[in-house]
Image: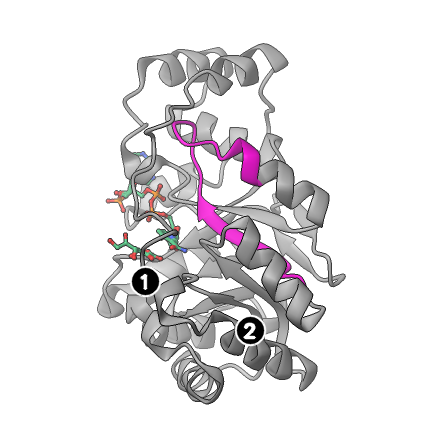
Amino acid sequence: MNSPVIRLNDGYEIPQLGFGVWQVPNAGAAAAVTAAIDAGYRLIDTAAAYRNEEGVGDAIAASPVGRDALFITTKLANPDQGYESTLRAFDASMKLLRIEKLDLYLIHWQAVHRGAYLDTWKAFVKLRDEGRIASIGVSNFTVPNLERLRDETGVMPSVNQIELHPRFQQKALRAYHAKAGIATESWSPLGQGSLIDDPQLAAIGRKYGKTAAQVILRWHLDLGLIAIPKSVTPARIVENFDLFDFRLSEEDIAAIDKLDRPDGRIGPDPEVFG
Ligand SMILES: NC(=O)C1=CN([C@@H]2O[C@H](COP(=O)(O)OP(=O)(O)OC[C@H]3O[C@@H](n4cnc5c(N)ncnc54)[C@H](OP(=O)(O)O)[C@@H]3O)[C@@H](O)[C@H]2O)C=CC1
Ligand SMILES: O=C(O)C(=O)[C@@H](O)[C@H](O)C(=O)CO
């Protein structure tokens, strides 16, 4: 079964369920991405900072699925922020990925102290206008900086990829995205694996004959989010895509809603990181 898709504010469609490759070594990236494509994933999420774009490129080149059926995301690394440096970094990523056109390019972090995200965004708009990228977006951006991009360039990001999982649900930012027409993409959707042992999630899973991981990922989909779980374990790669034969009840969604914690963040704080 195929992943459902979400329509972005620029008219392009993105698969709702994808495959992330942070912490997958370059040498193992081709095998992991090939297993993911075999399992049915079409969205692959990498980044220059992951240093595995070449391995991802190997899997794309060898894929039995045509390039047009795949949706490739990469991200601009923080030290490359700035107008000219972004143009150079984009070329470097495309050389490693060995593709003609990128589906989605993200500014990895707003990195406010660098003072360069606006110039970076202007370079993104140029690359999009030249047809080298379909969709442009950001990651780890806060509302004032999203609005600054829109106000200064007239282009609102299509996606904001943010840390989001049942213990850190980002309700306020999600509500803003919904009003502003920005798609929310959940990074570390499984809480980096920390939520898998939650007994409540396992109990919900038993009702559907599913694992806690599948319940969490189904929750992302039922909320209308894009989720990009990572695994290098072939059975888990398959398990995490086996979500399309059930939906969570309103009661179960309400129970997961209560797992949200003000201190539930696992990764860096976007206000200061980068
Ligand atoms: N924009 C950003 O700043 C960030 C983006 N990301 C993106 O989000 C993706 C996903 O986030 P990530 O931090 O990797 O964490 P995830 O929430 O996807 O969790 C991955 C961890 O969970 C384990 N796991 C996966 N599936 C299962 C399962 N079914 N049962 C039990 N354990 C499981 C994996 O182990 P194993 O691999 O050993 O199977 C791994 O340790 C990244 O790969 C990256 O693409 C992530 C962080 C920041
Ligand atoms: O995985 C990513 O996309 C990240 O940005 C993380 O590596 C993040 O930089 C981090 O967790 C650093 O500790």
Residue 132 lies left or right of residue 91; in this view the side is right
- Give the residue number, with chain letter if any, for mark 1: 274
Tell me the residue at 37%/43% (across/down). 188
Placement of 158 over or under 136, stated as above or below: above
Q: Which residues are magenta?
A: 156-173
Tell me the residue at 61%/30% (across/down). 222
Query: Can residue 154 be seen at all in this image of the molecule?
Result: yes
Tell me the residue at 51%/68% (across/down). 64
Residue 102 lies left or right of residue 12; in this view the side is left
Between discs 2 and 1, the one toward the N terminus: 2
Query: Can residue 244 be seen at all in this image of the molecule?
Result: no
Determine if the C-beta at disc 1 is less than 8 A from ligand 2. no
Placement of 241 over or under 145, stated as above or below: above
Whether residues under marks 2 and 1 lie with C-beta atoms below 8 angstroms apart, the answer is no
Q: Is residue 105 magenta?
A: no
Looking at the rendering, in which quadrant would you find the C terminus? Answer: bottom left
- Give the residue number, with chain letter if any, for mark 2: 121
Q: Work out which residue is located at the far right of the displayed protein and give it.
A: 11
Q: Position of residue 10 (x, y in %)?
A: 73, 63
Q: Nearer the viewer, residue 55 or 195?
A: 195
Q: Residues within 10 Å of mark 1 (few under 14, many from 20)?
A: some
Location of residue 151 by image quarter: bottom right
Placement of 82 over or under 148, stated as above or below: below
How far separated are the C-alphas under marks 2 and 1? Answer: 16 Å
Residue 245 lies left or right of residue 216; in this view the side is right
Q: What amino acid type should be assigned to the residue bearing mark 2?
A: Trp
Q: What amino acid type should be assigned to the residue bearing mark 1?
A: Gly
